[in-house]
Image (cartoon, rainbow, N blue to C red):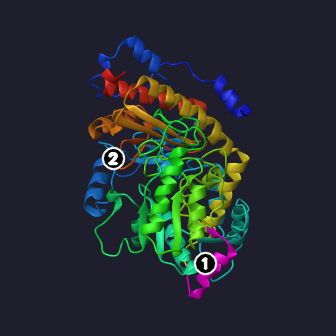
Amino acid sequence: MISKRVLAQTRQLLPRSSVRRSSSSSVHSKAAPAMIAQMQGEMPDCNHRPAAYEGSTYEQILKTRRNHLTPNLLTHFKKPLVIHAGHMQWLYDHEGRRYLDMFGGIVTVSVGHCHPKVNQALSEQTAKLWHTTNIYMHPKIHEYAERLVAKFPGDLKSVCFVNSGSEANDLAMLMARLYTGNQDILSLRNCYHGMSPYTMGLTAHSTWRFPLPGVNSGLVHVMNPDPYQGIWGGSNCRDSPVQTTRKCQCTVGCQAGDAYYNELEETFKYSLPRGKVAAMFAESIQGVGGTVQFPKGYLKRAAALVRANGGLFVADEVQTGFGRTGEHFWGFESHDYVPDIVTMAKGIGNGFPLAAVVTTPEIAASLSQALHFNTYGGNPMASAVGIAVLDVIEEEQLQRNSLEVGTYFLKGLAELQQRFEIIGDVRGKGLMIGVELVGNREKRTPLATPHVLDIWEKCKDQGVLLGRGGLHGNVLRIKPPMCITLADAKFAVDVLALAITETLPENN
């Protein structure tokens, strides 16, 4: 049943009027006026007014970035933004322009920028105690541990706090190898699990790999079960309100899932020591890889195969956890299995450096073989923020909001797919959404990068910030703060439609 909040939003959806225009647009006049009017929407109101920006000039910031920050610190957009304030789903640049944040600080801002309850929890904690490390007992880490593990099924009751997703996956790799006594770890091609020296090998994207010796030691990448771009798959394969338009051969069960699972079995037969696997890692929905979903039942069967060969199954919930996918609090729950280890970061702290590994007491005991310590993990400030984030998700029903607004959003994007040939696929669950742009829908070839960048830039100019992902950077990543409304989703769909029309009017 749709919630009263979303029902009220539906009644209040604004009539179509005007979106912010890109002053640099050269093709806008080519589109028919009636067509443009059909696509327009008004930016939803926001009563928040941030303080005026008083920092360095735009030119000074660019100079400092160029001269004193390492070159790997990339910026988005042809003219990078200087963001100086945020409020819930909104960001503000140094000139006072307001933007609808549809990327959530790379899927990190879960409950809203500067949420007042989270701000208050942090402020109160900093007035009492910042840091002791865990050589002393402080109350917040214990209170938070109780709250967090209560969200997990089964025997997943032991937690180790760290500071980032890379650290969490790094620690999960260590735990799996210590506990099983085995070395080999599997991950899916197209996955992203971090950029520490350890996890860089786990990540299976050439664009994120440095040519260093030993990175791939004991790591095996297996075929990615992608129903859209993979060898097998089609319109009945994934757990999403929107299915791929690719024809599906499935009649009973998912034949694509069976085929991908058979390929995984082949890896065990030919590329691994028999019965000697440490672990397999999988995101519940691939994030950096372009919001890729797997065939129904694949992860459950993969977990059983890994365990039959002496290994553990690790669910990477860095992007999909904390209610983002809507139906469940954790993404793995949609796949109907319970992992042995769960890693989480990003939305856990709403932007505060916080991450965690949750596992069973038996697996956690493997860390007793030697000293292991994390100076900042679970510090008083991080723990206070983590508790407040859980409170807000529950009190404001943000998991339910993710489901209802996300489903509305996905269906709106699916309607765009019917109008624009360059939208090859719309996919996701809740507020974990991807839109794949293609040059040829039948062949599923990526849209040329200049066109992708133009569409992306025009969305920014019109007030909507989107991410990009996938190996070719042609997937628009939509992972906003979970507090967005139906009006926000509608506005974003309207802006994307206008951006496509202005960039490639012949595709309308």
Q: Which residue carries the number 1 mark?
A: 132
Image vertical order of residue 145 relative to residue 208, above or below: below
Q: Residue at x 33, y 46 (%)?
A: 472
Q: Is residue 294 visible?
A: no
Pinpoint residue 434: horizontal percent, then vertical percent.
Answer: 47, 41
Q: Residue at x 37, y 30 (%)?
A: 422
Q: CA distance from mark 2 to mark 1?
A: 44 Å
Q: Is residue 33 visible?
A: yes
Which quadrant would residue 123 be assigned to in this image? Answer: bottom right
Where does the N terminus fall, quadrant-wise? top right
Pinpoint residue 212: horizontal percent, then vertical percent.
Answer: 30, 72
Pinpoint residue 190: horizontal percent, then vertical percent.
Answer: 41, 54
> Which amino acid, by three-letter code, is at mark 1?
Thr
Judge by depth and name the residue closer to the eye, 12 or 284: 284
> Which amino acid, by three-letter code, is at mark 2?
His
Q: Secondary structure at mark 2?
A: loop
Image vertical order of residue 265 relative to residue 367, above or below: above
Q: Few, some or many C-alpha atoms within 10 Å of disc 2 (few <14, some 14-19, many ≥20)? A: some
Pinpoint residue 452: horizontal percent, then vertical percent.
Answer: 33, 37
Query: Which one is earlier in the sequence, the residue at label 2 or at label 1?
Result: 1
Residue farthest toward the bottom in the current orientation of the protein: 370
Q: Is residue 342 magenta?
A: no
Q: Which residue carries the number 2 mark?
A: 472
Q: Is residue 367 magenta?
A: yes
